[in-house]
Amino acid sequence: MRIISAADLSSAVKRLFVDANRNLPGDMRSRIRACREKETWAPARETLDLIIENFELAEKNRVPICQDTGMACVFLEIGCDVHIEGDVNEAVNQGVREACKEGYLRSSVVADPLRRKNTGDNTPAVIYTEFVKGGSVVITVAPKGFGSENMSRTKMLVPSQGREGVIDFVVSAVNEAGPNPCPPVVVGVGIGGTFDKAALLSKKALIRSLDKPNSDPYYAALEETLLEKINALGIGPQGFGGATTALAVAIETMPTHIAGLPCAVNINCHVSRHASEVL
């Protein structure tokens, strides 16, 4: 049995949140630059140039890419041969507190959804825990801004709506979002499970590398179909028109009930931040 201290977990969470808010992942940078080269609409090209300049300056000056440094979403894959000494949830939240202070991250979390008093340190984090084989812990953090989170949708489709129903729902959700989620966006899609599980699948889809399509060719082809249809909407970067409304569509699925077809769309802005570390 391998032992990992809560302090080590906190330190890793802190490092990851500071890094994720300052440095856009390489796959995102490459995709944005590639879309810039393909754009023919001048306002779209100029907007993508500004987006590129922004993430380059953030890295150079060691400051957050966006003023909305997001709600702290943390995915933990804990190996069954690992014991974490201490309170796992408190360790994660301590890391978030330290990141908020060290990285100058905006305090964006309120303690109660209706009474709205700010917690002052971006806690509590939203923590998703999964137990896996092995003797390590994989930590993935995903600061989630709410300009895009507010545009996300879940719908309980019926089986007869099938593939076309999923396509119509996803494209409609992005079209209704328009410029609000700061496009070009990354679109996470969850299909299957239950009402709540579909939403989680759509969020997990957002942390997959843009260079890795769905491992099932059927769903990889559906990702491409959805991307083409979304970009044909012409919303474009920041809503100024153009061919780049979305940078990618990522689909995650799981088995579901014979009577249902849950589907969720979790939209992320062009600042699609995530970072991982293995302890």
Image: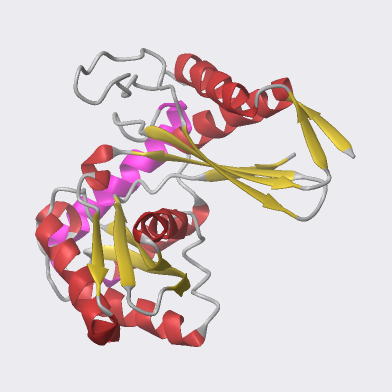
The residue shown at (45%, 87%) is 218
Query: Of residues 29 and 176, which is closer to you in this image?
Result: 176
The residue shown at (47%, 14%) is 101
The residue shown at (32%, 43%) is 53
Q: Position of residue 70 (x, y in %)?
A: 35, 33
Q: Position of residue 76 (x, y in %)?
A: 61, 43
Query: Of residues 97 and 241, which is closer to you in this image?
Result: 97
Query: Would residue 80 be seen by someone viewing this image from the given angle?
Result: yes
Left or right, 1 with respect to 240, comes to right
Magenta stretch in the rendered image = 38-63
209 inside magenta stretch: no
Left or right, 52 with respect to 155, comes to right
Check the picture and name the quadrant holding the C terminus. top right
Q: Position of residue 208 (x, y in %)?
A: 50, 60
| Position above or below: 99 against 43 | above
Left or right, 54 with respect to 207, comes to left
| Position above or below: 276 against 215 | above
Q: Position of residue 258 (x, y in %)?
A: 39, 80
| Position above or below: 55 against 106 | below
| Position above or below: 47 against 2 | below
Q: Report the colour scheme.
A: secondary structure
Query: Of residues 108 and 61, which is closer to you in this image?
Result: 108
Query: Of residues 15 and 263, which is closer to you in this image?
Result: 263
Query: Would residue 243 be seen by someone viewing this image from the given angle?
Result: no
Query: Which secondary structure type mostly characterizes the magenta part of the structure?
Result: helix
The residue shown at (42%, 26%) is 63
